[in-house]
Image (cartoon, helix red, strand yellow):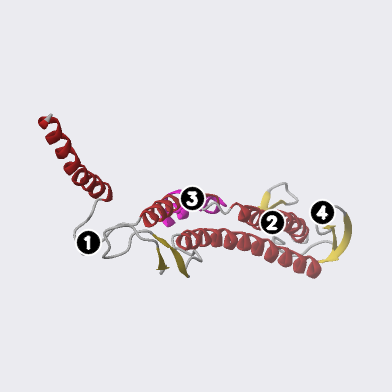
Amino acid sequence: MKTILQIFCAICVSLPLLGQVIITDSLKVTPEGAQVQDSVTTISADSMSAAKLSKFIPVPKKATRWALVPGGGQFYNRDYWKLPIIYLGIGGGIYAYVLNQIKYQDYLSAYKSFYDLNEKILNSDGELVDNPDYGQVTGASTRPVLVRNLFHTENTVQELTIDQVKRGKNYWRRNKNLSIIVAGLIYGLTIVEANVAAHLKTFDLSEDLSLKVGPKLQQPGLLLPAPGLRLVLNIK
């Protein structure tokens, strides 16, 4: 009987000590002055890291190489809405070049018809000799020229003088050269734009720059959790 009472007293004395050890272990008390990581901060940091990993960040060098193919740089940067603008610009310049080239050839052929371009002719004896009129204007003062409208949907034949044909030939030659220059400039701008856009996408342009108020469970200098507030200033 005496032995049973001694065991019962020993258990009663050890229970408070055991509870203190369990509570202390569950709280994971850190040394005084140590920084305690807040669970809210950990969750926020994890979510921000996942967001950064999921965000596409292009490489400017790769964007430039992709841009060598018209629209490839914008496709790499995922700026798909720019593709129709690029193809309309380049395609329009090439289409204008083709139209102007056809009109230029019409006037060029008519202009050549004013001149005698035969270097050799047959004399009265049937011998092949140099043409004394080579490169000279010969024949009638006008020539029939096929005149087309803007998109070549309609055309008429007009009798034009050599001066009119010459002006038309020079006009359409300038237009066809200008068309191919414009198409080349648009192509060059797409390469520059792809590189600049890739550089801009590497910067953090988020609007999360304000002061935020959030809950905080662990307070500095306290061993036990205590409810409180924290101020978070995001500077990027």
The residue lying toward the viewer, choosing from 99 and 216, is: 216
Mark 2 residue element: helix
Which amino acid type is shown beneath numbered disc 3?
Trp
Q: CA distance from mark 2 to mark 4?
A: 15 Å
Quadrant hosting residue 156 = bottom right
Looking at the image, is mark 2 or mark 4 earlier in the sequence? 2
Q: Residue at 14% across / 34% down in the picture?
A: 5
Viewer-nearest of labels 4 and 3? Answer: 3
Instruction: Report, in whole angstroms, how far the alpha carbon at label 3 lies from the one at label 1.
Output: 51 Å
- The residue carrying mark 1 is 34
Residue 15 appears anywhere in the view:
yes
| Residue 236 visible here | no
Q: Quadrant of residue 130?
A: bottom right
Q: Which residue is mark 3?
A: 66
Say which residue label 2 marks.
92
Disc 1 versus disc 2: distance between alpha carbons? 68 Å
Give the residue pinned by disc 4. 152
